[in-house]
Amino acid sequence: MIRGALKMVGFESPDHWDIAARHYEETAHPFTARYAEAALTRVHLGPNSRVLDVGAGTGALALLAAQAGAQVLATDFSPGMIARIAAAGVPNVEAQVMDGQALSLEDASFDAVFSIFGVIMFPDWRKGLAEMARVTRPGGYGVIATWREQGAATFLLLGQIRRKLFPGREGMTMPEAVNALNDPADLACELIAAGYRDPKIEPITFDYELDIGALAEPDSLFGMSPDWTSLDLVEKDAVIAEVRKMAGERATLPIPSTALIAVARR
């Protein structure tokens, strides 16, 4: 039984995300798209706008920006994620495997650069923010979304249940940037240090609707979290029972998840 802090094993490896890409597209993508849509409403994009999506995942932001008519480049270090974006076949979206900490792109080449829960996963997230600023044209926008608390959706729920059922056990270690950027003042300072100016930061909350029927396959539902994979079978049964108790008679359990959306100028 693991008693120390649990690390987000594999999250800094493209192989992890390659394996998870299809599941991520089906489960996380629709949820993160709500925050991506909120981010897009805070920036004016025209039909000729050049947009970069850094740490694009399966393209929640990129595909929405393309619908607005922008010319979009989506980048991610995971070939599996990039393959899912390419499979969408959207003509004004180009998808490339690229390290967001060292973008192989020219300076000042994009009107708006977004990272929706992407740069916050980087080992060198400050370098990721600096790279975003470097490729943003003067007067252009840099936009990031980060979690206000310890993650969101099932990760947030599992953390809450762990603290209730197993109070003596430390939880998983979140990526450094999730902790460093979850306060608006700190986030603003880091954006300015990266090369942006006039950051405006707003909290946005959406409910993740956990389908109680999905508890029939809990490893698929919770398997990306060390707060789940570290448990033994008895402990997992206790967690499932707690989720059912929280849901009561409802078919879904809402998990309020708050993000900070920051918009800054170059």
Image (cartoon, helix red, strand yellow):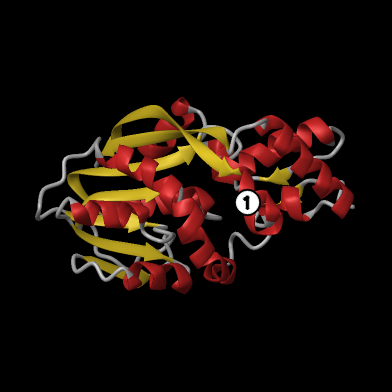
Q: Residue visible at 28% across and 34% down?
A: 197
Q: Specify the amino acid type for callout 1.
A: Ala
Q: Residues within 10 Å of mark 1 (few under 14, many from 20)?
A: few
Q: Residue visible at 58% across and 38% down?
A: 251
Give 178 or 164, whichever is nearer the viewer: 164
Describe residue 149's horizontal placement relative to residue 114 as left or right.
Answer: right
Quadrant hosting residue 216: bottom right
- Could you tell me residue 159's position as x and y percent? 70, 38
Give 88 or 250, whichever is nearer the viewer: 250
Give the residue furthest to the front. 249
Q: Residue visible at 30% across and 36% down?
A: 263
- Could you tell me residue 61's position as x and y percent? 33, 52
Looking at the image, residue 74 lies above or below residue 29 = below
Res 108 seen here? no
| Residue where numbered disc 1 is placed | 214
Q: Residue visible at 28% across and 66% down?
A: 105
Res 207 seen here? yes
- Could you tell me residue 82's position as x and y percent? 40, 69
- Could you tell me residue 225's position as x and y percent? 67, 52
Locate the C terminus by quadrant: top left
Quadrant hosting residue 102: bottom left
SS category of the residue bearing label 1: helix
